[in-house]
Image (spheres, helix red, strand yellow):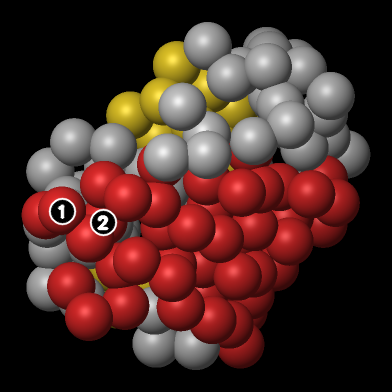
Amino acid sequence: MDNALGHEEDDSGTSDSSHSSEEDRVLKIREKAKFFNCKKHLAKFIRKSVGKIEAFDRIECYGNSYDESSCKYIAELIEEKSSDELYYADFSNMFVTRRETLPPSMKLLIDSISTKPIQQLYIHDNAFGPIGVAQFKDFL
C-alpha cells in the first residue's frame, strides 16, 4: 500500500526506501477517498509523511474531500515545506461534494502557490462554477 508520500508500505507501516530521491520531494495526499473534516484529521493522517520530508517540489492532493480548515493546513504546508522550485500542483477532484466551501478553500490553495514557479496545475473534476473560477483571477 502507498503511504501519503507515495512510498510502498508493508504491513508494519514502514516505508520502502528503494524509491528515488525525486520521489521523496513529492507530497502526496491522494486517491484515498477520505473526507477531511478538520485540520486535525488531515494532520493526523499525514503526520509521519510530513515529518520525513524536508522540502517538496510537487504536491498531489486529488481524490479526497477537504474542508476549509484542511485546505488552510495544506496551504500552510506549501508555505512552510515546499521548495522554492514547487512546479507541480494537483488539486483535482477535491471539491465535488463541498461546493459551499470551494471558493474560500480554493483561494487558500491558489494563494499559497502564487509565488511559486508553477508549471503544471491540475484542477479538473471539481464543481467550480463561476464563483470557484473567480478564485483564480489573481493567479492567472
Can residue 48 be seen by looking at this rendering? no
Check whether the beta carbons of the residues at disc 2 and disc 1 lie within 8 A of each other.
yes
Q: Quadrant of residue 67?
A: bottom left
How far across and how far down the image is residue 58, in percent?
A: 59, 27
Dot 1 alpha-carbon crowd within 10 angstroms: few under 14, some 14 to 19, many 20 or more: few
Left or right of 99 on screen, residue 83: right
Query: Could you say which is closer to the camera, residue 93 or residue 50?
Result: 93
Query: What type is the residue that disc 2 sits on?
Result: Gly
Residue for badge 1 = 130
Query: Could you say which is closer to the camera, residue 114 or residue 138?
Result: 138
How far across and how far down the image is residue 103, in percent?
A: 34, 66
How far across and how far down the image is residue 40, in percent?
A: 61, 87
Residue 42, label in figure? none
Instruction: Determine whether 70 is above or below 94 in the image.
Output: below
Total marks placed: 2
Left or right of 109 on screen, residue 53: right
Question: In terms of secondary structure, where does tag 2 sit?
Answer: helix
Dot 2 alpha-carbon crowd within 10 angstroms: few under 14, some 14 to 19, many 20 or more: many
Residue at image coords 66%, 48%: 112
Residue at image coords 11%, 54%: 129
Query: Could you say which is closer to the camera, residue 29 or residue 131?
Result: 131
Residue at image coords 22%, 80%: 100
Cα distance, mark 2 to mark 1?
A: 6 Å
Query: What type is the residue that disc 1 sits on?
Result: Pro
Instruction: Determine whether 41 is above or below 16 in the image.
Output: below
Question: In terms of secondary structure, where does tag 1 sit?
Answer: helix
How far across and how far down the image is residue 72, in percent?
A: 60, 70
Residue for badge 2 = 132
Can residue 105 be seen by looking at this rendering? yes
